Amino acid sequence: MGQKITIDPVTRVEGHARVTIQLDDSNQVSQTYLHIDQFRGFEKFSEGRMFFEMPSITPRICGICPVSHHLASAKACDVVAGVEPPRPATLLRQMLHMGQIVQSHALHFFHLASPDLLFGFDADPAIRNVAGLVQVNPDLALKAIRLRKYGQEVIRHLSGRKIHMNWAVPGGVSAPLSEASRDAILGDVEEMIGIAQAGISVAKEWLGANQDVVQRFANFPSMYMGMTNQGALELYDGPVRLIDAQGNQVVEFDGADYLDYVQERTEDWTYLKFPYYKAMGWPEGVYRVAPLARLNIADHITTPLANEELKSFKALAEGPVQATLYYHYARLIEALYGLEQIQVLCHDEDILSEDIRNTRTHITGHGVGVIEAPRGTLWHDYHTDENGVITRVNLIVATGNNNWAMSNAVDMVAKEFVKGSDVTEGMLNRVEAAIRAYDPCLSCSTHAVGQMPLIVEVTDANGERLERFVRN
C-alpha cells in the first residue's frame, strides 16, 4: 500500500475543502480526490416558505456572491408570479449584477490568486498572501482594494446593502436609483477601468513569461457552457450555449429547460454533485463553466475595451483556450466588461426611472431563474402550490458545474508536480492553486434532495473500530 497525503484545509478559497493524494508503492501519484465535506440544506428548509421570501433567503447561501443568488431567485419568482419586470427594473438588476462581477473577480484575482503569480508557487507561505502583497507592492494592493470596494459600492447604491440585500422582488425592484448615486458610480468608473487594465497587464505578463508552467498546469480539452446573447458575452439573461472541445456548438437551449439537458451524478467522496450534459451521459458529457468557458463560447463582447482583450484571448489558441491558468486572464476581461457595462447603464435614459415594479400577480406554480454568476451558470428552480407556498426547490450552483473540472485539475497537477516521497509545500500549493483557478464558492455549492449519505464510526480509546453505521 502506498502513502496518502492530505491537504486540509485548502486555502484561499471560499468555503471548506480537502484534497487526498494517493501514492502508489513507488511513491508516484496514482489518484487525487477533491473532497467537499460541508453540507448546506437550503433546498429543504426553504420548503413551506412563501415564494416571494426566496430572494431574501437565498442570498444567505453565501456572503461572497449573495447578488447572484438574489437575482437568480428574483428571476425565478418573476416566473412564479407570472409577471414581467419593467425595462428600468431590468436595467437596475443588470447593474447590480455588474457590481457583483467586479467585486468578486477583483477579490479573487488580487487577493486570492495573485500571490501565487507574483511571489511564485514555492514562496514562503508567510508572505504568499494578501498581507505579503501589501508589503511588496502596496500600490497594486491599494488599487485592488479600491476596485473591490467600487463593486461593493455599486451594490450598496442600488440595494442599500453590500451583502444579503432585500431589493429585487417579483416583478422588479423595490427602490429606484437616485441621481446622486448614479453620479457617484459614474464618477469613479474611469479610474476603475484603469485598475482592471493594470490587473490584465499583470496577468498577461505572468502568463506570457511562464508558458512552460501554463501548458503543464491542468491543460486539458473539455466542453464549455454559458450564456450568450446573439453570440455576445452575456451574464444576466440569454440562452445557454454548449460547445465542444473544438469550439463547435453542441446545443443552445432556454435555461428554464435545464433539466432536459443537465443531469447530476454523485460520488461517495464528496457532497458536491457532478453535473453533465444529459444527452452524452457520464463522463462524456462533462463541461466547464465560468469566465474561461464564457469567453470560449462568446463570439464578441459588446463593450469596446473588453472586446479588444477578447481578441487577444482568442488569439491564444486555435479553438477554445484550454489551460486552467487562463481562467485568471478571462476573469479580469469580464471585470473590465462589467465596468464598461456599468458605464453604459448609467447613461441609459431609463436608469433613473421610477417605473420599477410590475405588481400584477398570477401564481403559475413553477419558475426557473438562470444567471451567470461569477463562478458560472446558476439555476434556481422553485415549485409552489396554488397559494405560492414553496413545495420543492432545486439549485444547480455555479461551482457545482465545475466540480468535474476541479477534480480533474487537481489530479493532473498532482501527477505532474508531486514527485516521490520528498513532498514540498510548494508542490502541494500547486495542487491547491488548481482549485483556486476556478474560484470555487464551496459554501454555495453543496446541496441535496432527500437523505444525504452518512457514515458513523465508533472507536475505542485506542482507535480500534467497534461499530460502523452506513446510510445510503
Image (cartoon, rainbow, N blue to C red):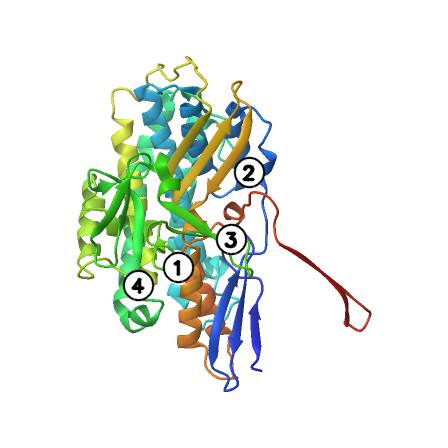
Residue on which the image places disc 2: 43
Of the two numbered discs 3 and 4 on the same chain, state the one appearing first in sequence.
3
Of the two numbered discs 2 and 1 on the same chain, state the one appearing first in sequence.
2
Q: Secondary structure at mark 4?
A: loop
Q: Position of residue 229 (x, y in %)?
A: 23, 37
- Mark 2 vs mark 4, foreground winner is 2
Residue on which the image places disc 1: 405
Amino acid, disc 4: Ala
* Distance between the alpha carbons at the discs numbered 4 and 1: 11 Å
Residue on which the image places disc 4: 323
- Mark 3 vs mark 4, foreground winner is 3
* Residue at image coords 47%, 69%: 429
Residue on which the image places disc 3: 272
* Distance between the alpha carbons at the discs numbered 3 and 1: 12 Å
Q: Secondary structure at mark 1?
A: helix
Quarter of the image where the C terminus is located? bottom right
Find residue 98 and report its image quarter.
top left
* Distance between the alpha carbons at the discs numbered 3 and 2: 14 Å
Q: Nearer the viewer, residue 460 or 328?
A: 460
**Above/below status of 295 relative to 188:** below
Few, some or many C-alpha atoms within 10 Å of disc 3 (few <14, some 14-19, many ≥20)? many
Few, some or many C-alpha atoms within 10 Å of disc 4 (few <14, some 14-19, many ≥20)? some
